Amino acid sequence: MINRKVSCIGAGTIGHSWATLFSWHGLEVNLYDEDEEALDKAFNLIKSNLKILWRYIESPLRKGKKL
């Protein structure tokens, strides 16, 4: 059985960036930080980053199509 879970300690720039990367690759991510406000901000940044990545993947330019 393969473990598909990862934990990130700290929700700052590096922590939320790693969490975004792991989430993008289908892993379940637990993000920890003592500061509840930092966790809220990180959650919103992760959602935003994943939406941007998805739009890029779905972009006609990414698929080699002309606009």
Image (cartoon, rainbow, N blue to C red):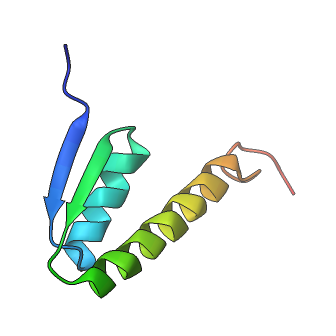
Q: Quadrant of the C terminus?
A: bottom right
Does residue 10 appear to the left or right of 53 in the view shown?
Answer: left
From the top left corner, tell me how far across and down residue 56 is, in percent.
62, 56
Please state which of residues 19 and 33 is positioned toward the viewer in this rendering: 33
Q: Residue furthest right?
A: 67
Based on the displayed image, in which of its 4 quarters is residue 46 positioned? bottom left
From the top left corner, tell me how far across and down residue 20 is, in percent.
37, 58
Q: Residue at x 39, y 81 (%)?
A: 41
In this view, 23 is above or below 17: above
Does residue 43 appear to the left or right of 65 in the view shown?
Answer: left
From the top left corner, tell me how far across and down residue 15 is, in percent.
21, 68
Q: Residue at x 34, y 53 (%)?
A: 21
Q: Residue at x 61, y 48 (%)?
A: 57
Please state which of residues 38 and 53 is positioned toward the viewer in this rendering: 38
From the top left corner, tell me how far across and down residue 29 is, in percent.
28, 49
In this view, 31 is above or below 64: below
